[in-house]
Image (cartoon, rainbow, N blue to C red):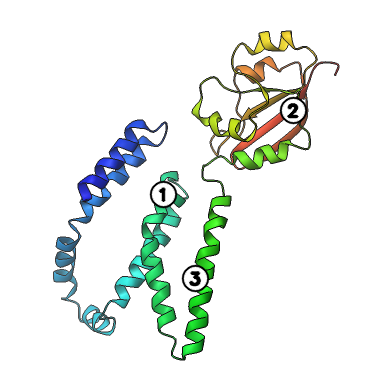
Amino acid sequence: MALIASGFMVWLASIALYRNEALMVVSTGPVLALWLPALARAMAHVLTRSRAFVRWRARSAGPRLLVVLLGLAAPLALFVLSAKVAILANRAFLIFLPYLVILVAGAVAGIGPRLPRLGATVAMIGVFAASVPYSFAKPGAANDYKSLVMAMMPHYRPDDLILVLDKAWVEAPFFYYLPDAHYAFTDYDAVLRDNPGARIWLVTWPYEDMPVVSDARREALAAYRREQHVTARRASAELFLPPGG
């Protein structure tokens, strides 16, 4: 199973457009996990020489420490790491959900009276059930395409022209939310000459290291005047009016 999981991650890294190195690092996890028992025995051999550790371990004996480590420490580590490595985001976090369920169920089962325990069970099931549509409503990609299109709508007209990149995977989800728009993929100067009175949208995907994306599209719009600028998470749409428009 470890080899299958690692092979699957290596395959994902081979077809990924970005973050290949991060995927390769993640793919070593299942195989390295097979060495955890040997590592634990080696650490125990060293730590049991400490009287303080032996006393602490006696107080924390049983499965509770394991559940806390799996249910709290591992997800917390993922949350911290995801700030720098995007691959450790919400979809990769799903693998730790069983331990979170065990942790929550253990706390609910520890309630003594029957009615409060039953009420807590119903409440926890409700929270988990409500989290499913809430999670699906959140953007699943680094760029928030849906929110960007919603921000554009108050200023958008059906005859507007949108300048996008040619054959760029990063653009693909944007077409889903705005399928009937007029797009220009190449020869931006020629497109602007053929549509001298058109309002132009420049859609880009800035990120932390590149807050403003400049390419041939922005150069072609040098004589145009920017009228509106809407943003979402790692997404930007600028509305330009033609010279004299």
Crowd band around label 2 with a 10 angstrom C-alpha radius: few (<14), some (14–19), many (20+): many
On screen, 61 above or below 81?
Answer: below
- Marks 2 and 1, how far apart at CA: 34 Å
Percent across and percent down for residue 220 are 67, 15
Q: Residue, x 23% and y 45% (percent of image)?
A: 4
Q: Which residue is mark 3?
A: 125
| Mark-to-mark CA distance, 3 and 2 | 46 Å
Residue 69 occupies which quadrant of the picture?
bottom left
Q: Is residue 177 left or right of residue 142?
A: right
Of circles 3 and 2, the one toward us is: 3
Q: Is residue 147 visible?
A: yes
Check disc 3: other Cα within 10 Å, few if <14, some if 14-19, many if 20+.
few
The residue carrying mark 1 is: 88
Looking at the picture, how far across and down is residue 199, in whole percent?
77, 22
Say which amino acid is labelled 2: Leu
Comparing 62 with 41, the one in front is 62
Q: Nearer the viewer, residue 13 or 156?
A: 156
Give the left or right position of residue 16, taking residue 177 as reference. Answer: left
Residue 239's label in the rendered image is: 2
- Residue 101 is situated, as x and y percent measured from the top left of the image, at 40, 68
Of the residues shown, which amino acid type is indicated by label 1?
Leu
Whether residue 72 can be seen here: no
Classed neighbour count for the residue bearing mark 1: other residues with Cα under 10 Å, few (<14), some (14–19), many (≥20): some
